[in-house]
Amino acid sequence: MVGILAGCASVKTADFDDIQLYTLKNKAGTTVKITNYGATVTSIITADRDGKLADIALGYNDVSGYMNAVDKPYFGAVVGRYGNRIAKGKFSIDGEEYELATNNGANHLHGGVIGFDKVVWDAAVVDENAVKFSYLAKDGEEGYPGNLQISVTYTLTEDNELKLDYLATTDKKTPVNLTNHTYFNLKGEGEGTILDHELMINAKATTPVDIGLIPTGKIVPVVGTPFDFTTAKAIGRDIGKKDQQLEYGLGYDHNWVLDKGDKDGKMTLAATVYEPTTGRFMEVFTQEPGIQFYCGNFLAGNLKGKAGKTYVNRGGFCLETQHYPDSPNQPDFPSTLLAPGEEYKTSTIYKFSSK
Ligand code: GLA
C-alpha cells in the first residue's frame, strides 16, 4: 500500500512544502519508506529468521537530517548525474572539454555540490506498491552538458524485492551513471559494525585506484588478495591486512567488475550478504557492469540514527550498482555516454529474505 505520510513534518519552510514521504508495504510485512528529497530511501524494515522486524537502512528521522548531514554520507539517496568520481571534474566529448564542480578534493564526486541527492524530485504514485520520482537536470547544472530528464521508479514486490528502474534521456551528449547509496546493516541500523556480515561479490576483478580514489585504468584480478569475495566471507576477515588499495580506501571503497554485467541486458546476481546472528540475507541483482562496495569507512561515530543510536565507523555498507568510476576519462571502460535519441535504462534489485 502506498500512503503519503507526514514523516517529514519537521520541514516547515515554504520552499520544502513539496517534500513527502512515501511508504511501500507488502504482505510479508516488509516496509520501505522513500522521500522525494534526493529520491532517498529512508527506511527498510524486514523480518529476521524469527520474524522479528528491524530497520536495516541507515538514515535520519526527518529531512533536515539529510539536508544538514555532516561529512555528506549520502544515506539512501539516488546519486547522479554521475555516481562516484570523475578525475579533476573534467572530461571531453567530441573535442569539447567540460569542467564540473569539484567537491572531493580535486575531484568530482556523486554529481557535485548539489547532486541529485540534494534536490526535490517530482513524485507520482504508480500503483499500490510503486512510486516514481522524476527530475529535470538542467543543461550546465554542476557543469554537465544537456538537459537530462531522469526518473527512478521504486517497486516493492510480494517476493520482497525492492526494484529500482532508472530511465534518462538528454538533448546533448552527456555522461550518466545513476545509483542508489543506501547503507545497510542487516542487524539493524545503529546495531554496531557490519564486519561480521558475510559478503559474496560475483566478480573476479576490481578497478584499483590512486590515493584520490580515481581508477588507474587497470582491471586487476582479485584472486589471492583481500578483494576476493568470489566465495562469501566476513567483510572484516581481511580488511585489516596490509594492502595499498585498502590503505587508499581506508578499507573497502572500490569498484568490482561484475562477471556478467550488462552484456545481454539481463539481470545478473551481483552480490549476496548474510548476517549470521539475525539470519537476514540480501541479494543484489543488476544490469550494470560494476558495483561499488563501500563499507562505511568515513562514518566517524558523529552521527546518530533514527533510533538515536550512534553510527559507528563501518556501521553500514553500500552496494552501489554502477558503471565504473571515472569512465568519461577511461576509454577502455564501458561507456557512460548518453546521446540525444538514446535511452538510459537500467534496473537493480535488492532482495530481502532470511535463513
Ligand atoms: C562512495 C564513495 C566513497 C564515499 C561515499 C560517501 O561510496 O566511493 O568514497 O565518498 O560514497 O561517503
Image (tube, helix red, strand yellow):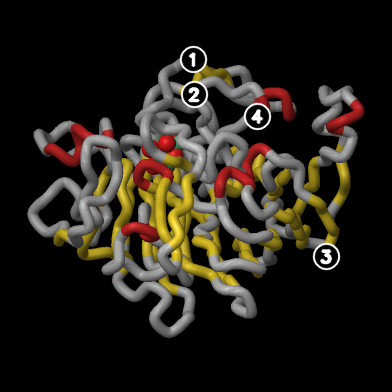
Mark 1 Cβ and ligand 1 under 8 Å apart: no
Q: What residue lies at 86% left-to-right and 31% top-to-bottom? A: 15
Q: Give whichever of 16, 2 is nearer the camera.
A: 16
For marks 1 and 3, the one nearer the N-term is: 3
The numbered dot on residue 126 is: 3
Task: Give the vertical position of 177 relative to 227 (above or below).
Answer: below
Q: Give whichever of 39, 319 is nearer the camera.
A: 39
The numbered dot on residue 66 is: 4
**Viewer-nearest of discs 1 and 4:** 4
Neighbor class of circle 4 (other Cα within 10 Å; few <14, some 14-19, many 20+) is many
- Tag 1–tag 2 contact (CB < 8 Å): yes
CA distance separating discs 1 and 3 = 37 Å
**Viewer-nearest of discs 1 and 2:** 2
For marks 3 and 4, the one nearer the N-term is: 4
Residue 130 locus on image (x, y percent): 76, 62
Task: Give the vertical position of 159 relative to 51 (above or below).
Answer: below
For marks 1 and 4, the one nearer the N-term is: 4
Q: Quadrant of ligand 1?
A: top left
Which amino acid, mark 4? Tyr
Neighbor class of circle 1 (other Cα within 10 Å; few <14, some 14-19, many 20+) is few
Q: What residue lies at 42% left-to-right and 73% top-to-bottom? A: 268
CA distance separating discs 3 and 4 = 25 Å
Q: Which residue is mark 2?
A: 71
Which amino acid, mark 2? Asp
Secondary structure beneath label 2 = loop
CA distance separating discs 2 and 3 = 34 Å
Residue 355 relative to residue 259: left or right: right
Residue 340 seen in the figure: yes
CA distance separating discs 1 and 4 = 14 Å
For marks 2 and 4, the one nearer the N-term is: 4
